[in-house]
Amino acid sequence: MRDFFESKKFKILLGVTIFLAGIMAYAGANDRLTAAPQEILGVALYPFQWVSSHISEGLGQTWEKYVSFDEVQQENETLRQENKQLRDKLVAYDRMEAELRAYKELDKIQEQNPENTYASAFIIGRDTMDVFGGFTVDVGTTSGIHKGSVVVSDDGYLVGIVREANLTSCKVMTVLHPSFAAAAAISRTRDNGILAGSADYAADGLCVMTNLPRHTEAEVEDQVITTGLGEVFPEDVLVGTVSEILPESGGKSLQAVIKPGADIQSLTHVFVLTND
């Protein structure tokens, strides 16, 4: 029996009895004895009510966060779609602006060559292995372009020739390529020669004009143009200027080093002749 009075259970029971007696005494002193059972029950249930209240509050906040997160996701998706549309419009605007600038220059070209028609073309790819500056443009046979079509810069200088044409794109061989050849002349002296690419000069963005007569009076800075001979290239297309005149290896003629009027490596837009 003595063990019971010294046990934890007895101490807890004694504590609860004293606690309840205290509540009853407080209720009696304040004329609230009839409400004592309810108050005792309220005290006993308070911890459970507190836990229940906080759980309910937590669940409510979690649900609000979930609903809010779903709304944010929808808003983000809407913003992504709107941004994509704006980007697409900006790309289209940039293209139109670039073409407008190019067509302003085209007016000058057509004043000199009114018989020619042109297709606007943006460069969409370059072959990094092609040291002669070859590239691909975004127009093809559906735009009236074919193998052999002539390519000029926005300000009318000869760039090259189409070597392969597909429905919506084509590959261009430039004037720097050793396989390129066109009948040309010194504009001032009318001395004729062959415009061609050269592996010796391509890295510097230069080409050559061979078979110039030894008695030529051509000088540095003279303009070079096409002659139209062979009916591949139109007549009087600007090529560039003479930067140097050298004797050819055979000794019977001269060779002029030509600086093209178009910077082949930095081109982003060209025109392709469609009437040849």
Image (cartoon, rainbow, N blue to C red):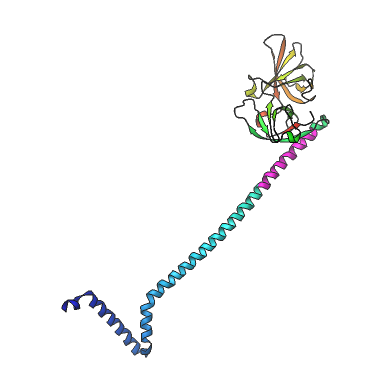
The residue lying furthest to the left in this view is 2
Q: Residue 134: x, y in percent?
A: 65, 28
Q: Residue 143: x, y in percent?
A: 75, 35
Q: Residue 201: x, y in percent?
A: 64, 20
How many numbered discs? 0
Please indicate, yes or no, whether residue 267 appears anywhere in the rendered image: no
The image quadrant of residue 206 is: top right
The image quadrant of residue 195 is: top right
Residue 134 horizontal side relative to residue 50, left or right: right
| Quarter containing the C terminus | top right
Q: Residue 169: x, y in percent?
A: 69, 34
Q: Give above or below for 272 relative to 201.
A: below
The image quadrant of residue 138 is: top right
Secondary structure that dominates the magenta span: helix
Q: Nearer the viewer, residue 67 or 177?
A: 67
User: Is residue 234 on the magenta stretch?
Assistant: no
Residue, x 38% and y 87% (percent of image)?
A: 35
Residue 13 horizontal side relative to residue 3, left or right: right
Please indicate, yes or no, whether residue 17 appears anywhere in the rendered image: yes
Residue, x 57% and y 60% (percent of image)?
A: 71
Q: Give above or below for 60 relative to 247.
A: below
Residue 1 horizontal side relative to residue 95, left or right: left
Q: Give above or below for 223 relative to 39.
A: above
Residue 230 horizontal side relative to residue 14, left or right: right
| Quarter containing the N terminus | bottom left
The residue lying furthest to the top in this view is 251
Residue, x 69% and y 44% (percent of image)?
A: 92
In the image, the segment drawn in magenta is: 88-108
Q: Nearer the viewer, residue 169 or 13?
A: 169
Residue, x 73% and y 23% (percent of image)?
A: 241
